[in-house]
Image (cartoon, grey):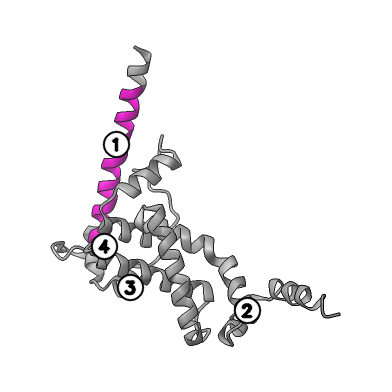
């Protein structure tokens, strides 16, 4: 019977619901924490990669995010979905990393001019016609990774992760108007980068034909 106990314990931990895993992880269960890690590691890594555009940094920050989760899971009260809470924790880990590298998420030199209505509004998930066309996914990913860190952070949080400007302002520590300004400039820069990438692609294909 004793030989079967570890297997039974392992099987039960893998079948834990998220709520059960959270409660057991709060009590110090390594198996429960591993279950949470396995469920959420890919999304946390994807977020870190989009915000840093660096695979090595993304891997390190993913580990740091789960280290923070291990330390702070006791503070989770269930007032929001666990995935949302972990997502915000991960965003904060990345922002702290950017600040330590002297790459502020929002440049202090950026100021907002004009009213908030001067900036384009776009529902999350809606198609941006100015970006539509012959843009494939790899082109878009490369262009986003080439954005300056400040622009990339705001763009990822709003257009990819779906945060509202008031939420971004709170997370990043800027004004709502500044968040809108940064997003507007990020989109303009992104279109410029995509145009350059397309031009380079055309030039390369012409060279190959010669």
Residue pointed to by mark 1: 195
10 displayed left or right of 44: right
Residue at image position (82%, 80%) is 2
Residue pointed to by mark 2: 21
Tell me the CA gap for discs 3 and 4.
14 Å
Residue pointed to by mark 3: 171
Residue pointed to by mark 4: 180
Dot 1 and dot 2 residues touching (CB under 8 Å): no
Closer to the N terminus: mark 3 or mark 4?
Answer: 3
Tell me the CA gap for discs 1 and 2.
47 Å
Q: Nearer the viewer, mark 3 or mark 4?
A: 3
Residue at image position (34%, 49%) is 145
Q: Which residues are magenta?
A: 181-204
Closer to the N terminus: mark 1 or mark 2?
Answer: 2
106 displayed left or right of 32: left
Against 8, residue 145 (above or below) is above
Against 110, residue 67 (above or below) is below
Residue 169 appears in the figure: yes
């Amino acid at each position: 019977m004793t030989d079967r106990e570890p297997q039974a314990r392992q099987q039960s931990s893998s079948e834990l619901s998220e709520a059960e895993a959270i409660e057991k992880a709060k009590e110090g269960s390594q198996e429960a924490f591993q279950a949470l890690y396995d469920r959420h590691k890919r999304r946390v890594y994807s977020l870190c990669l989009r915000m840093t555009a660096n695979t090595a940094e993304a891997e390190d920050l993913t580990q740091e995010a789960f280290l923070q989760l291990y330390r702070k899971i006791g503070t989770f009260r269930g007032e929001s979905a666990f995935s949302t809470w972990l997502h915000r924790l991960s965003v904060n880990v990345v922002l702290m990393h950017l600040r330590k590298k002297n790459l502020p998420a929002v440049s202090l030199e950026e100021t907002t001019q004009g009213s908030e209505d001067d900036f384009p509004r776009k529902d999350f998930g809606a198609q941006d016609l100015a970006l539509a066309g012959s843009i494939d996914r790899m082109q878009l990913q490369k262009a986003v990774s080439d954005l300056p860190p400040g622009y990339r952070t705001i763009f990822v949080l709003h257009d990819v992760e779906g945060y509202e400007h008031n939420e971004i302002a709170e997370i990043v520590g800027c004004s709502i108007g500044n968040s809108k300004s940064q997003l507007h400039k990020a989109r303009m820069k992104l279109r410029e980068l995509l145009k350059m990438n397309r031009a380079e692609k055309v030039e390369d294909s012409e060279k190959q034909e010669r």
